[in-house]
Amino acid sequence: MSIVGEAAPAAGSNPWWPTPYRVERRVAETGDTVTLTLRAPTGTAPPAFAPGQFNMLYRFGVGEAAISIAGDPARPTELVHTVRVAGKVTESIAGAAPGETVGVRGPYGTGWPMDDLPGRDVVVVAGGLGLPPLRPALLAILARRERYGRLEVIYGARSPKDLVFYDEVQAWRRRDDLRIQVTVDAAGRDWYGDVGLVTARLPDARFEPARTSALLCGPEIMLRLTARALEQAGVPPERIFLSMERNMKCAIGLCGHCQFGPDFVCRTGPVFPYAAVRDRLDRREV
Amino acid sequence: MAPNAVGERRRLLRADFPAFLTALRERGYRVVGPTLRDGAIVLGEIRDETDLPIGWTERQDAGTYRLVRRDDAAVFGYTVGPHSWKKYLFPPRERLWSAVADGTSFRLEPDAAEPVADAFLGMRACDLAAVRISDRVFDRTAPDPGYHGRRRRTLRIAVQCGGAAPTCFCTSMGTGPGVGSDHDLALTEIVDPGPHRFLVEVGSEAGAAVLDRVPTEPAGAADVAAAEAAVARAAAEVGRHLDPAGVRELLLDHPDHPRWADVARRCLSCTNCTMACPTCFCSTTEEVPSLAGDRTEKWRRWDSCFNLEFSQVHGRPVRQSGLSRYRQWLTHKLASWHDQFGSSGCVGCGRCITWCPVGIDLTEEVRAIRADPTAVAPPEAAP
Ligand SMILES: Cc1cc2nc3c(=O)[nH]c(=O)nc-3n(C[C@H](O)[C@H](O)[C@H](O)COP(=O)(O)OP(=O)(O)OC[C@H]3O[C@@H](n4cnc5c(N)ncnc54)[C@H](O)[C@@H]3O)c2cc1C
Ligand code: SF4
Ligand code: SF4
Ligand code: FES
């Protein structure tokens, strides 16, 4: 980070400071979603991250938003984020062209329980933009595929047009060491996949409940229903992990916005074991 | 004059109090403390003793506050007002950083201004407790540079209460009225029996360094006894109570208690309680770009869990109902604060009771739930 003046403390010593990263690549995923590949300032590398963590991305003069890290943990020099336009800040981030600058601070939060997964069947359920935060975990599993049991992926989106990482998902469908079911809420006649909610695909997934860990990311209603169905199927609730979303202004436990009962989602989340949050998840307006 | 030592007790005559204010300024402090403004005792800069509300006190109760004259010339003869010291340590609006455009990139500007060193004159025992809590709150993932930058420079001059307001319940929360040992100097005002004077307890080297410049004498047994009597009088005057035993479980285990709906019908979601509360810390951030677009500033300002947008996710607030927002405030303050910061978030100062426009009293709300924890809402009356 370039800080002018002698009095300035060392880079990174202020938790509020964003570091300017350069946009290297910008890929349109859907009509409103892009994937950015970012480069750290010359001579530096992005800080190491755990799959499931997020950064605060910043646009000069516009503001900050919490965005999950979507890149391959095996490629630590590039920082990858998938952003859907939801408002002013995400619109500006998604509009950042190669060569432009996006500020970064992070990574923040808890990650997926990667150490818990070897030797177990892994069920991954992604709803909509829930896939990008799960992608680093999936890539890490696929890189050492032999260490895991079965790998079942269920990916749901509103419509075929809303599927992200389309080519990669197609490539996964051709692999024989994982099963992936792609389902959409509604589709035209040119869609050959499933139609319906992700929970409806669960009975078709092949896994041994008692030796399964599940990773869930998506809208809260989907998390609630899927976690419930997995528990009913016999997956231990402490082995079901879900990534929660709350309003976030600081990501460092200071602004209070992300509170979810006693938890600050930015610190003790976003990934929680279902067993720890089930009561709150079932209650409205916590 | 022999230098003062930590732990020592000195007698400061009222007549020498101006010298004490002068000594603070000579040591480089900006003195802030209680002052009269807009019909209340608020916190502001104290240039000389005429800025202090000498001879004034207040009558406060749920939803009301009124200044009244005392029949003596006590300097600190009142309790807490609408302001708390968080307004200095965690200002209502604060610039976090600024940056300038640099080609296609940006560059952060160093903050040139050194924060001023404040002497907080007149912190009550509950105020000290609130700052102890805030010290932990603002030291989470990383210490907040703004808060801790100011906090490190702050001189805490406590004043032990000689009386309590009807809204005070520090004795319930174990925070007062006597001050403990985490102050730089602690004053107890003794008006009567005369002479008008202060018992001063030295709490730190920084406090001692100020006192060294002020004429004082060793305190006598009569000074100590009078100060203890003052604090005992305050403790006896405390009229509100909140039984802290099991409050965390009581509130968390009864999220559907009908009292939540009852209080939600009275609550205006005005945010006064969260603004007045010395420990509420919620904030939001704002980007403030220059018109020309070549410069920008990141600001932080107080926010409140009573605001609808506070919990906004995907265009919809998580806490849509007033009920859920009041429940967030009270369960955070009295219950989940324990899980987060190892103590209650309430110090019993009573500000939220006084400054609630409809007089909602958290001690009353807790009592109502405790009286009948398993109460269920009566069925809707048939039309
Ligand atoms: C841990 C975490 C990870 C996230 N990961 C991604 C990601 O990988 N990709 C992505 O596109 N988005 C992600 N989001 C959501 C993203 O942060 C919000 O869409 C963004 O903050 C909206 O900001 P905005 O200024 O563009 O929109 P605004 O104009 O501020 O708001 C647009 C709408 O989004 C709502 N909103 C505000 N804050 C949030 C929030 N934190 N979450 C959801 N909605 C919000 C607003 O209430 C409003 O309705 C993540 C959020 C969290 C908490
Ligand atoms: S909750 Fe009310 S009484 Fe307790 S510290 Fe805050 S303002 Fe004071
Ligand atoms: S009570 Fe509300 S405003 Fe106060 S700290 Fe808790 S969430 Fe923030
Ligand atoms: S985002 Fe600010 S406390 Fe979690």
Image (spheres, rainbow, N blue to C red):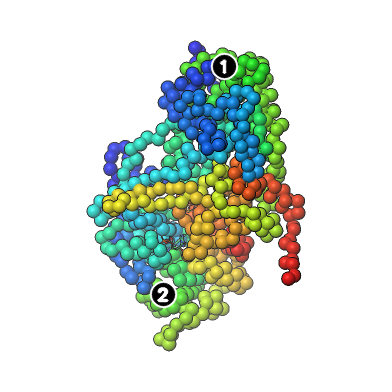
- In the picture as drawn, the residue positioned furthest to the bottom comes out as A189
In the image, what residue type sits under mark 1?
A: Leu
At mark 1, the secondary structure is strand
Structural crowding at the residue carrying mark 2, measured as other residues with C-alpha within 10 Å and reported as few (<14), some (14–19) or many (≥20): some
Say if residue B209 shows up in the picture: no
Return the x and y of residue A37 as percentages of the image width and height: 32, 63
Residue A99 occupies which quadrant of the picture? bottom left
Residue B191: quadrant of the picture: top right
Q: Quadrant of the C terminus of chain A?
A: bottom right
Query: Image check: B120 left or right of B260?
Result: left
Instruction: Give the labeled residue for mark 2.
Output: A162
Q: Is residue B314 above or below residue B203?
A: below
Task: Identify the chain of the residue marked 1, using the numbered disc in the image.
Answer: B
Residue for point 60% across, 23% down: B73
Is residue A49 shown left or right of residue A42? right
Q: How many numbered circles does the render carry? A: 2
Same-chain status of marks 1 and 2: no
Q: Nearer the viewer, mark 1 or mark 2?
A: 1
**To which residue does mark 1 refer?**
B13
Chain of the residue on which disc 2 is drawn: A
> In the rendering, at what x and y percent does residue B208 appear?
50, 21
Where is A138 relative to B341, above or below? below
Say what amino acid the circle numbered 2 marks: Asp
Question: Residue at image x 52%, y 17%?
Answer: B16
